[in-house]
Image: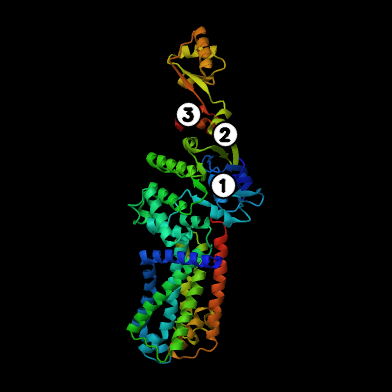
Amino acid sequence: MTHPAIAAHGLRKSYGDKTVLDGVDLAVGEGTIFSLLGPNGAGKTTVVKILSTLVSADPASGPIRVGGHDLAADPRAVRAAIGVTGQFSAVDGLITGAENMLLMADLHHLSRGEGRRVTAELLERFDLTEAASKPASTYSGGMKRRLDIAMTLVGSPRIIFLDEPTTGLDPRSRHNMWQIIRELVTDGVTAFLTTQYLEEADELADRIAVLDNGRIAAEGTAEELKRLIPGGHVRLRFTDPAAYRNAASALREATRHDESLALQIPSGGSQRELRSLLDWLDAAGIEADELTVHTPDLDDVFFALTGPTGIPDQHKETAR
Amino acid sequence: MSSLSLAVRDCSTMLRRNLLHARRYPSLTLNLLLTPIMLLLLFVYIFGDTMSAGIDGGDRSDYVAYIVPGLLLMTIGSTTIGTAVSVSNDMTEGIIARFRTMAIHRPSVLVGHVVGSVLQSVMSVVLVGAVAVAIGFRSTDATVLEWLAAFGLLVLFALALTWIAVGMGLISPNAEAAGNNAMPLILLPLLSSAFVPLDSMPGWFQPVARYQPFTPAIETLRGLLLGTGIGDNGWLAVAWCLGLAVLGYFWSASKFDQDPR
């Protein structure tokens, strides 16, 4: 990463005596998608608010540069480089979609003709042409998000902040939004995305940082993060309690789940490991009724790294 | 483009946004117009006979002439309550957060509200003035210059109260609180020389009524439209207006510059 689009060191923010961000380091490469992943209340939105000049970081924070400009010294230059789509739609509900777009064109000082052209183009691209003359307050959630992003794009920003862009959207709208974000990045735009959906980060992001309690708990590619935690295991399930008890006493390294009559054996899940495990089960005369291989996913990472209890497998069923 | 012309451009963009809001949703402005018009009709037709007896033995038409200047200024106070409410409403909208993250002239958001609101005040004053004329108000011997001065005073007064109302809107957590916080803007005229002469009030209260912002403006307007004596009220009125406008501007701008709630 020779020239990061966003770089922050020791980002701190507290409201009163409540510390929201407690020394966050971030570096986002130009033209990449960076995802800040974390549970509700982890401080994701605060990070976006600070990086987008909406609120100021605490004085104890280190230097922050966005788009090559110092955030504290030259917020105006930062603002000229960025576009922000917030968690709550930043559209003017009292006026129409087209009027919202023209408002943005005017504020970016586009000429009248150019403003009309850009507006029409973006409304078309985001499938809003038909609704353009209706007040934005009458739009559905998905339409508002699309209008929101379309407005953000009027000024052709080089860096885009997307704060939970798909929260509350139905699956189709969510996939549309993902497609939109991918297209933006193909054009060289840098995207800073916050999400609480692991799938979304896995799907889109080049790099992911897990934010928990105001600190970065881990950072890397999705693959790197998955390798971080020993979530891989083989699960053996039994229907006969006696068989279960036999197996449990033979397999001392297994984790027991007495209620579901299941045993969990740590394993990377490779063919070789599985074969030796099966051979061993045969030799011990253990016959499970069901065998499943579980490879670690971002859910495991998420649960291992965030929150008070770091027990990956127990959340498996409820999280998916 | 120079930074000045960019600032002007942003302000006019925000003004257009504001006028668009006012045009689409005129009910708030119209509701606020009702108060001064109701008061005008109430004081003239219901209380008129008694009230007019209190002002040097005049009749009802004298009393119409007496209260119209005060009601015109009260109309401005009433309109600016709408300003406080709509600023407060606006600040809860996501679009304001967007504006804050854009490279625009920051105060343009507020300037749009202020200019839009002053224009609304002027329109409201014209409407209330028309009602006043319809029920018999006549400006006796005002020259063109005096008419212009009266108009200028109304605009300046509107500008001053509007900036104060914007500040009130910014410190209010919601529209209801904004409406309450801005209430003095419509209650102050009741404690001025708008409806009854100062010397009919209790002695201890007279200085309060005499030097609050509405009374000098009312006396000046009366003097310009009806030829009564202005005295030092002219300067007092202009000083109040400029003082409140400057105070309101800096107060609002600093509130707007703070991190949003």
Q: CA distance from mark 2 to mark 3?
A: 15 Å
* Residue name at image x 42 percent, y 79 percent: B72
Q: Which residue is mark 1?
A: A47
In primary-sequence order, the first of circles 2 and 3 is: 2
Q: Amino acid at mark 1?
A: Val
Compared with residue A163, is residue A265 higher up or lower down, i.e. above or below? above
> Picture coordinates of residue B177 (x, y %)?
47, 62
Q: CA distance from mark 2 to mark 1?
A: 19 Å
Q: Amino acid at mark 2?
A: Leu
Q: Which residue is mark 2?
A: A305
Which label was assigned to residue B116? none
Q: Which residue is mark 3?
A: A316
Q: Are marks 3 and 1 in contact (CB under 8 Å)?
A: no
Which element carries disc 3, helix, strand or loop?
helix
Same subunit under labels 2 and 1?
Answer: yes
- Judging from the image, mark 2 belongs to the subunit labelled A
Of residues A88 and B107, the one nearer the viewer is: B107
